[in-house]
Amino acid sequence: MLPERRKLPNRREHVTAKVVLFEGTSEERRFHMSFGVDARAARVGDIWIDGPKAGSHEQAALHDAAAVVSVALQHGVPVAVLAAACDMPEGAPRSALAAALKRAEAIEEEFTRQ
């Protein structure tokens, strides 16, 4: 059984980012990502990812993956654990989800320093 879900504050910090994967190649992909942050706890609690083409299967898959990650985060799974599960040879994300989790780690570090 999962630990109880941590309810996020109704008003919370929100960080947005533009991410480019495989820049300068024929595989280049651009994504917009948003992160809901509980500043009191210095934790990312939800992630949204918009893909390169609205209405595409890729965008639907990214939406679903981000929703699953958000549920895991709200049930106490650390961002670092989720990021470690992604394929990032030499620390370079190979997918939009991996890039989002890497960015979420950086956001949590920034909020921890504040």
Image (cartoon, rainbow, N blue to C red):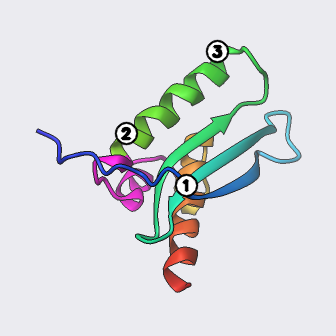
Coordinates of residue 23 in the picture (x, y in percent): 83, 48
Q: Which residue is mark 2?
A: 71
Task: Return the mark for residue 57.
Answer: 3
> Seen from this angle, which residue lies furthest front?
10
Check disc 2 and report its element: helix, strand or loop.
Answer: helix
The segment highlighted magenta reads 73-88
> Seen from this angle, which residue lies furthest right?
24
Q: On the rendered structure, is 30 left or right of 79?
A: right
Coordinates of residue 81 in the picture (x, y in percent): 35, 56
Q: Amino acid at mark 1?
A: Arg
**C-alpha gap between disc 1 and disc 2:** 18 Å
Q: Earlier in the sequence, mark 2 or mark 3?
A: 3
Image-quadrant location for residue 29: top right
Return the residue nearer the eye: 19 or 9.
9
Q: Amino acid at mark 3?
A: His
Return the residue nearer the eye: 58 or 12.
12
Return the residue nearer the eye: 42 or 63.
42
Q: Which residue is mark 1?
A: 11
Q: On the rendered structure, is 47 left or right of 72?
A: right
Check disc 3 and report its element: helix, strand or loop.
Answer: helix
Residue 79 inside the magenta-drawn segment: yes
Q: Mark 1 near mark 2, Cβ–Cβ under 8 Å?
A: no
Seen in the picture, residue 92 relative to 22 is either above or below; the reply is below
Q: On the rendered structure, is 49 left or right of 18?
A: left
Q: Residue at x 71, y 15 (%)?
A: 56
Seen in the picture, residue 9 relative to 49 is either above or below; the reply is below
**Image depth: mark 1 or mark 3 in front:** 1
